[in-house]
Every structure is written in C-alpha cells, then in structure tokens.
Image (tube, rainbow, N blue to C red):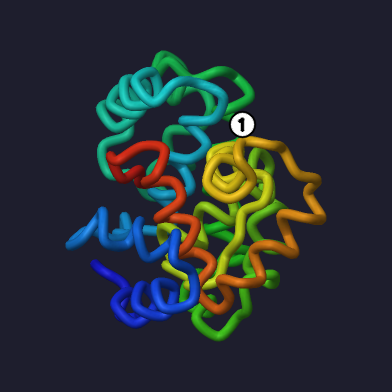
C-alpha cells in the first residue's frame, strides 16, 4: 500500500530543496510500502537485529517454517521451547515471547494507534523487551507509514545527510536534528529518499 500523501510530499520537498528534487526525480514511481501486519512486522524486526540482511532472511524463513502463521497466539502456544531450533538466540526468543504477551494482554493495541501521536506509540513499543527507539521509529515509518518521523539514530540517514549536504563532514546530533526541520512535515519521505541515495534498492522492515 502506497501512502496517500506521497505525491504531495515529494512535490513539496522538491519545491523547497533542490537536492531533494534531484533525488525525487531520480526515483520516480517508487515509494514507501507497508508490510501490513503489526505483529509480524515487529517480530521480523526482532529476528533481524544485529545480523546481516541475508542472515535475517534465512532465520526468518526458518522461524516461519516452525511457527506457520506468525501471530501472537501461535508464538505463545509454542512457547520458548517450541521456538528453539529456529536459529534464534535465547535472548531473541525471550523478546518474541514478550512481544506476543504484550499483544495478547492488550498492552499493545494496534486498533487504537490511529488516534495516537508518534511519541505515544513509541512509548508503548519500547516497553517491550528488545524494542528500542530505532525499531519503534522504523515501525512508524514502514508499518504505520507516519509521514514525519526522523530517525536520528539511523546510521544510513546520518551518512546520507553528511554526504549530500556537508561534503562528508560529520555533524553533531543536535545539528542534524535542527537540519531536519527543513523537511517537516514530510521527514519520513525525505529520509526514504536519502536512504535511496545510498542504496537504490528500497528496504522494508
């Protein structure tokens, strides 16, 4: 599903930022795409932590092969012992069990997120073991498709800004935060195009 705001955002970013206009023109017809299911998206983000994309895909395939339908109920039903043998570390199995528990208990309730602002959702997500702010921000961008997320801790975003706007010179976090204000209210879209400037293959989380 393509975000309804994408065309407007790309046009407004292009009008206000010549460099961004070049990136928008370079990648026509592609955009952010949501994976859809919140639990599956978060489970996949946990599985992929601190390993390569290739390794994450392999472990995820093994995980799905064992679990079948990736749902909170199914993960809880299998329990920690049932998830052994998927290639997951003991810690990641604990994280997935905690994630499933938060969904089943209603502590994470996606149906109500449309009415919540970004920071409120981040606060809910980081209460789950194994989910930090970066993972929560990726979820906001790639699952909920929130238009104005600026993941300052993302190394790829930092590198793209340094390369495109500061001749490769690193800048302090506070300067990056202030610099990103120029892209409001479309910072998620600007971030996506900056990622593309480093890697033309769109990434989905």
Residue 102, percent across and down?
A: 60, 55
> Could you tell me which secondary element the residue under label 1 belongs to?
helix
Vertical position of residue 181 compared to residue 204: above or below = below
Residue at the limit of the structure toward the bottom, as seen here: 115
Residue 114: image location, x then y, percent: 50, 81
Q: How many marks?
A: 1
Which of 160/59 is in front?
A: 160
Res. 99 in view: no
Q: Which residue is mark 1?
A: 94
Residue at left offset 80%, top offset 45%: 172
Q: Is residue 164 left or right of residue 182?
A: left
Name the quarter where the N terminus is drawn. bottom left
Q: Is residue 69 left or right of residue 87?
A: left
Mark 1 crowdedness (10 Å alpha carbons): few <14, some 14-19, many ≥20: some
Nearer the observer, 176 or 48: 176
Residue 156 seen from this side: yes
Q: Quadrant of residue 149?
A: bottom right
Q: Residue at x 64, y 64 (%)?
A: 180
* Vertical side of 46 occupied by 184: above or below: below
Q: Position of residue 119 (x, y in %)?
A: 69, 70
State the residue at coordinates (55%, 18%).
89
- Judge left or right: residue 12 versus residue 156: left
- 69 to 12, vertically: above or below: above
Position in image of residue 105 (x %, y %): 59, 61
Q: Nearer the viewer, residue 178 or 92?
A: 178
In front of the other: 2 or 120:
2
User: Which residue is located at x 42 percent, y 55 percent?
Assistant: 192
């Amino acid at each position: 599903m393509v975000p309804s705001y994408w065309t407007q955002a790309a046009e407004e970013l292009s009008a206000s930022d010549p460099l961004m206009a070049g990136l928008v023109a370079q990648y026509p017809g592609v955009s952010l795409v949501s994976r859809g299911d919140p639990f599956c998206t978060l489970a996949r983000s946990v599985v992929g932590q601190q390993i390569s994309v290739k390794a994450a895909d392999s472990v995820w395939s093994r995980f799905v092969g064992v679990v079948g339908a990736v749902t909170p109920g199914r993960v809880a039903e299998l329990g920690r012992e049932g998830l052994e043998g998927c290639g997951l570390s003991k810690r990641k199995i604990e994280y997935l069990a905690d994630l499933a528990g938060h969904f089943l208990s209603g502590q994470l309730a996606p149906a109500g997120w449309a009415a919540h602002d970004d920071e409120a959702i981040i606060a809910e997500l980081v209460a789950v073991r194994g989910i930090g702010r970066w993972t929560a921000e990726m979820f906001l961008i790639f699952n909920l498709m929130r238009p104005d997320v600026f993941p300052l801790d993302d190394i790829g975003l930092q590198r793209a800004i340094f390369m495109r706007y500061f001749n490769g010179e690193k800048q302090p976090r506070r300067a990056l935060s202030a610099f990103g204000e120029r892209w409001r209210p479309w910072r998620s879209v600007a971030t996506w195009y900056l990622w593309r400037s480093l890697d033309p293959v769109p990434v989905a989380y």
